[in-house]
Image (cartoon, rainbow, N blue to C red):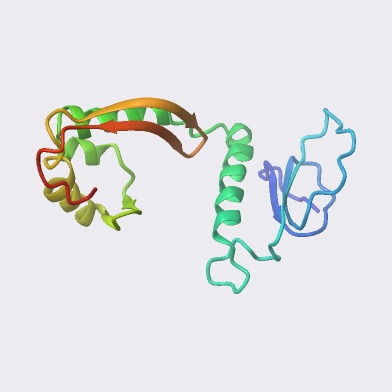
Amino acid sequence: MESSRDIASIVNYGSFEIEATRPTLYHKPGNQPIPVKKDPSRKNKTYYYPNVELLFVLPAHTFFHASSASVSHTRTLSFLKPILGGPYFDLEEIWEEHCLYEFGERAVDKTMSTMVQEPYVNHIPTLTGGIGRTKLTEFYRDHFVFNNPEDTALELVSRTVGIDRVIDEFVFSFTHDREIDWL
């Protein structure tokens, strides 16, 4: 099947396996079969996604399944990065810097400098935030960074760091001495 030495690995979104000499990642619809003893020398990896159909990762397709597509994306990054040699980012360090600028220094431009080119924030309970650099900058400037009470504090309870995300559980404490429209 392979004719190029430039192919470092294969990612397959299908229901069948292919013969390949390169490390291969499979994303298969359906339930995982009964586990069998794994061969530690094998460089292939298979993930199963119950309750999805083929093409579940294509946003325009009828069978698109957002949460499974997101999980498969993260798994693909985790599979490919060591094979391709990165790029690697210290997401925890970037997140710490972001929180310092957001809550400590209260600096909107510095906060925005820690974000991707097309950022978005969505505070689900109040449907506040912004999509894109302009709208998110306006949100931070006009509704978030300068509207939090002076004694705002974050107490970290737990942190999970993945290859493409940081998930914090924290206690957000403050004196409710003003209107906090984003909250």
Residue 148 sits above or below residue 56 on the image: above
Query: How far from the left and from the top, in percent, is residue 110?
Result: 19, 35
Whether residue 113 is visible to the viewer of this picture, yes or no, is: yes
Query: How far from the left and from the top, in percent, is residue 123?
Result: 32, 51
In the current view of this chain or complex, which residue is farthest to the bottom? Answer: 62
Q: Nearer the viewer, residue 163 or 142?
A: 142
Q: Residue at x 54, y 59 (%)?
A: 66
Judged left or right of residue 65, residue 142 is left
Judged left or right of residue 37, residue 46 is left
Q: Residue at x 37, y 25 (%)?
A: 156
Residue 96 sits above or below residue 16 on the image: above
In the picture, the quarter occupied by the N terminus is: bottom right
Whether residue 131 is visible to the viewer of this picture, yes or no, is: no
Within the image, what quadrant is residue 99 found in?
top left
Q: Residue at x 56, y 31 (%)?
A: 85
Q: Residue at x 31, y 50 (%)?
A: 121
Query: How far from the left and from the top, in percent, is residue 128?
Result: 26, 55
In the current view of this chain or complex, which residue is farthest to the front? Answer: 176
Q: Nearer the viewer, residue 21 or 35?
A: 35
Query: How far from the left and from the top, in percent, is residue 116?
Result: 34, 45
